[in-house]
Image (spheres, rainbow, N blue to C red):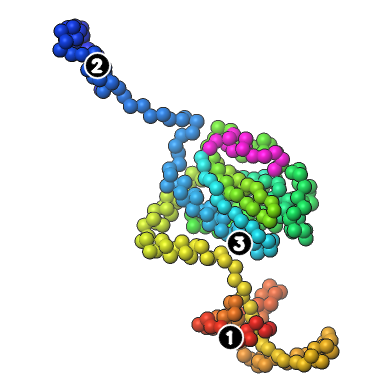
């Protein structure tokens, strides 16, 4: 507490210094002990988001990274690696200045009245993906330029994968969907919020064949503010599980997106080489199974299910009727 000395106290203190009863060093120490401790605070970046909530945000996008990598791997049929690099709280102006120009930037609307966010993807990665979707190998990447209308249309498949995996990642926090509102090549034309407004920036590192780039995501604070409590609850729920349970969850999370080959085998047949050479359209091959017998379904080379053949939405399908203890069968690779 601040205290002002009276004239008598000042005179007594000066007299004590002259007589040597009190030294100037002691007076300085007395003065410093009364000083108030000051903590720096940046009013342009108020601490509105706790470290626990940022941890929950990171958990969501860890799940998003795993899902997106698996989805692109299956759709593009090429090597791809995605890593979460950083989750930061910055201003929207700083986010825009960190982006390249031109670029591939889209505004997404989060349902349930949450608002708009944006995603930016470096053009070398986008062009490599478009090249693969059009039949190339992703190596014929041109200098960065604004995408044409046809290229934007082709890239729609990429955004569909992103939206699906974002929805799945956010499902543990809130029931929301994502919808593309618009595309932009110049980040300065994208007025998502004011330059001084706080946003959460998520940065992913992508490597696709010989191309590499960055995927940036921007969540305005006003958009994610309603779900911050849910983020904290998710972190607490996860940390509250036992060490053993946490290890099991980490193991499950590491393998849950691994693609598996599942096959339905209708039956087998043996023919001579001469019959094989004379096969024509319309010929029939008799299999060693009866039409009433269930179809065997294999995961890899292991028999895991029995099912009934049919169709769903115009595609061949198998309805699982029985689960079998996985075991390897000889000849399971034959169709």
Res. 289 image quadrant: bottom right
Mark 3 Cα-neighbour bin, 10 Å: few <14, some 14–19, many ≥20: some
Name the residue that disc number 2 marks.
25
Name the residue that disc number 3 marks.
70
**Magenta extent:** 90-103
| Closest to the observer, 69 or 163 | 69
Compared to residue 254, the image places residue 13 above or below, namely above
Q: Earlier in the sequence, mark 1 or mark 2?
A: 2
Is 102 placed left or right of 92 in the picture? right
Is 46 placed left or right of 303 in the picture? left
Could you tell me if the residues under marks 3 and 2 are in contact, i.e. CB atoms within 8 Å?
Answer: no
- Disc number for residue 329: 1
The answer to whether residue 293 of the structure is visible from this angle is yes
Kindly identify the residue that appears in the image at 49 percent across and 49 percent down. Answer: 57
| Closest to the observer, 4 or 138 | 138
Kindly identify the residue that appears in the image at 43 percent across and 54 percent down. Answer: 234
Say which element carries label 1.
loop
Say which element carries label 2.
helix
**Front tag of 3 and 1:** 1
Q: Where residue 59 sits in the image (x, y, percent)?
A: 49, 53
- Gap between marks 3 and 2 measured at Cα: 69 Å
Mark 1 Cα-neighbour bin, 10 Å: few <14, some 14–19, many ≥20: few
- Gap between marks 3 and 1 measured at Cα: 29 Å
**Rendered-image quadrant of the C terminus:** bottom right
Q: Earlier in the sequence, mark 3 or mark 1?
A: 3
- Disc number for residue 222: none
């Amino acid at each position: 507490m601040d205290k002002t000395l009276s004239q008598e106290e000042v005179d007594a203190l000066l007299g004590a210094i002259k007589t040597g009863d009190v030294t100037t060093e002691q007076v300085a120490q007395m003065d410093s002990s009364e000083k108030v401790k000051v903590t720096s605070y940046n009013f342009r970046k108020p601490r509105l988001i706790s470290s626990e909530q940022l941890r929950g945000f990171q958990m969501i996008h860890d799940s998003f990274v795993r899902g997106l990598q698996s989805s692109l791997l299956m759709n593009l049929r090429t090597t791809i690696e995605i890593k979460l690099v950083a989750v930061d709280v910055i201003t929207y102006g700083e986010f825009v200045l960190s982006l390249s120009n031109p670029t591939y930037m889209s505004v997404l609307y989060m349902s349930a009245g949450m608002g708009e966010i944006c995603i930016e993807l470096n053009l070398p990665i986008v062009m490599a993906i478009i090249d693969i979707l059009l039949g190339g190998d992703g190596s014929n990447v041109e200098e960065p330029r604004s995408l044409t209308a046809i290229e934007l249309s082709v890239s729609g498949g990429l955004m569909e994968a992103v939206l699906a995996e974002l929805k799945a990642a956010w499902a543990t926090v809130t029931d929301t969907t994502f919808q593309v509102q618009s595309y932009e090549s110049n980040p300065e034309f994208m007025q998502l919020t004011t330059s001084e407004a706080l946003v959460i920036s998520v940065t992913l590192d992508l490597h696709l064949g010989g191309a590499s780039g960055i995927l940036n995501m921007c969540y305005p604070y006003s958009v994610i503010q309603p779900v911050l409590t849910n983020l904290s609850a998710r972190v607490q729920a996860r940390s509250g599980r036992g060490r053993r349970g946490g290890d099991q969850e980490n193991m499950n999370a590491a393998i849950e997106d691994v693609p598996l080959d599942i096959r339905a085998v209708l039956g087998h047949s043996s023919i001579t080489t001469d019959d094989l050479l004379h096969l024509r359209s319309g010929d029939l091959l008799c299999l060693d199974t009866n039409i009433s017998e269930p179809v065997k379904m294999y995961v890899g080379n292991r028999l895991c299910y029995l099912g009934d053949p049919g169709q769903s939405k115009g595609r061949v399908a198998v309805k699982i009727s029985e689960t079998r203890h996985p075991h390897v069968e000889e000849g399971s690779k034959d169709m």
